[in-house]
Image (tube, grey):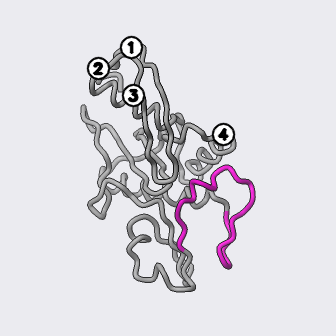
Amino acid sequence: MKVDIDLGTSNTVLAYRDKENIKILKSNHDSYLMPSRVLLLEDDSIIVGWDALTHPKRFPNKSINISAIKRQLGKTEKLNFSSFSTYPQEISALVLSELKCQFESLTNQQLEEVVIAIPSHFDENQRSATIDSAKIAGLKVARLLNEATVAAIAYSSDHQIVGKILVFDLGGGTLDLSVIDVHYKLLRSEL
């Protein structure tokens, strides 16, 4: 099955089509958002998402609390967290893997292909790093779409609008402003 993911700086969201309806994955913590957070404990266990955000050992000196890793995507050097060293793509892959596990557990469907929404300002290195993160998580990227484009498609489809749309993307890590010109009406069946 193919799904859409907004791999955010602060939170990550997964949407999928269930018969004729678009659904947003509700996490095992009863939320539509999953924190883009990874916690590495001193016993080398790795905890992702809500469990990382709420874990009782998230603040002790020997735990490593990683968030906003999206800002590091595209950098070629390893990141060092105390005794732990890794690339940003591997941390993002942990977030994507957690989403994949939750999706497959809740829907009993195999998740293989994704469309990922990325910031409009992402350069080629950041785009490649996003694709690498998905590959590490065992996902094939069908396409990368700018977040503003995704918002414009959703809005124009829901409201049957043709024309210019101004999109403010007030993300957890970035603020993007885009003007998008929609040339034709999208029908719900095209999505």
Horizontal and vertical percent position of residue 108:
32, 51
The local secondary structure at tag 2 comes to loop
Disc number for residue 153: 3
Amino acid type, callout 1: Tyr
Relative vertical location of residue 144 with respect to residue 96 in this rendering, above or below: above
Between discs 4 and 3, the one toward the N terminus? 4
Amino acid type, callout 3: Ile
> The N terminus lies in which quarter of the figure?
top left
Disc number for residue 160: 2
Amino acid type, callout 2: Gln
According to the picture, the residue beneath numbered tag 1 turns out to be: 184
Horizontal and vertical percent position of residue 119:
54, 41
Between discs 3 and 1, the one toward the N terminus? 3
Between discs 4 and 2, the one toward the N terminus? 4
According to the picture, the residue beneath numbered tag 4 turns out to be: 123
Distance Cα–Cα, label 1 vs label 2: 9 Å
**Stretch in magenta:** 65-86
Q: Can residue 100 be seen? A: no
For the residues labelled 3 and 1, say whether their Cβ atoms are less than 8 Å apart: no
Amino acid type, callout 4: Asp
